[in-house]
Amino acid sequence: MSGQAETTAARPRLSRRSLTLNIGLFLVGMHVTVALLTLVWTPYDPTGMTGGRLEAPSWAHWAGTDRLGRDLFTQIMIGSRIALIVGFGAVAIAATIGVTLGVLSAFATRYLDDILAAAFDILIAFPTLLLAMLVVAATESASLFSATLALGIAISAIVARLTRILAKRILSMDYITAARTAGASWPSIVLRHLLPNIWPMLAVNFALQFGLAVIAEASLSYLGLGAPPPNASWGRLLQEAQGTVYTAPFGAIAPGIALVTLVIGMNLLADGLREAGDPTRRGRQ
C-alpha cells in the first residue's frame, strides 16, 4: 500500500516536470519555427515602408508599424532569427573554448590548475555585458559576428569553470583508475568516460547561457554595439521605440514579449532537462 501511495504521489511531481519541459520546448520551438520561416517568407519586406508611421495593431499589421512605417511583426520575426543565431553561435563558441580549457585544467598540474581556476573566477567576476562590450570595441566594428564572438568569449569562462569542477569529480572515480590500470590512454578516457558523463550537466548550463546570450545581445543592440541595420534585433527595436513609448507603446511591448518568451522558454527547458537528468532528484521525489 505504501509503495502504491508513493507512486501516486510521484505522478503529480512527474507531471509538473513534464509540464515545465513541454512549455519550454513549445516556447523555444515557436521561435525556431518563426526563424526558419523568415528564410522563405515574411508578411512584408523587412525594409519596406508598408504603412503609416506608428500605426496601432490591425489586421493589416498585426503588431502595428514602427516610426518609419515598417511592419513591426515582420521586424520581430527577423529578430527571432537573429536572437537564435547569436544564442546558438555564442553557446557554440563558449562550449568550444570553455570545455577545452576546463578539461585541460582538470588534467593540469596543481600550480597550473590554480592559475587557470583563478583566471576563470576573475573573468566570471566581470559582468558578461561588460566583457562583450570590450571585445566588440577591440574588433572596431559592430556586427552580428562580432556580437556573437564577444558573447561566446565572455560566457566561455562560466563553461570552463563548470567543466573543470565536473571533470575533476569524474577523474577521481574508481572506474577511471581502473581504466588507466587497464592501459587506456588519457584521450580515450576523455572521449569514452569523461565527456559522456559531464555532458548532461553541461547541456543544462548551455541552455541557461543561451538565455543569457540573448539578453546580452539585445543589450548590445540597444547600445548600438550589436547587429547593425537592417538587422532587426529586438534590442534595436526597443531602442527605437523608447522615444514613442507613450504614444505608441506596442512598439516596445511587442519585441519585449518576444524577448521574454524566448528567455523564459530556454530557462524552463533547462529546468526540465535538469529535473529529468538528475537521478538524485528523481530518487527523492
Image (cartoon, rainbow, N blue to C red):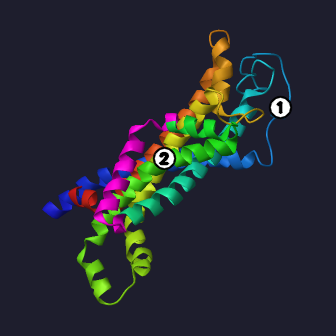
Q: Residue furthest top?
A: 247
The span from disc 2 to disc 1 (Cα, nearest Å) is 33 Å
Q: Residue at x 44, y 45 (%)?
A: 268
Is any part of residue 99 visible from this angle?
yes
Q: In the shown orientation, is residue 92 left or right of residue 282?
A: right
Which residues lie in the magenta part?
106-130
Of label 2 and label 1, which has the lower sequence position?
Answer: 1
Residue 120, magenta (yes or no): yes
Q: In the shown orientation, is residue 23 left or right of residue 12?
A: right
Q: Which residue is under mark 2?
A: 155
Residue 231, magenta (yes or no): no
Residue 47's disc number: 1
Q: Residue at x 54, y 52 (%)?
A: 91
Q: Residue flagged by tag 1: what amino acid is it? A: Thr
Residue 122's disc number: none
Determine the image quadrant of residue 92. Answer: bottom right
Q: Residue flagged by tag 2: what amino acid is it? A: Ile
Q: Disc 1 on helix, strand or loop?
A: loop
Q: Residues within 10 Å of mark 1 (few under 14, many from 20)?
A: some
Residue 272 appears at what percent x and percent y? 40, 51
Main SS of residues in magenta? helix
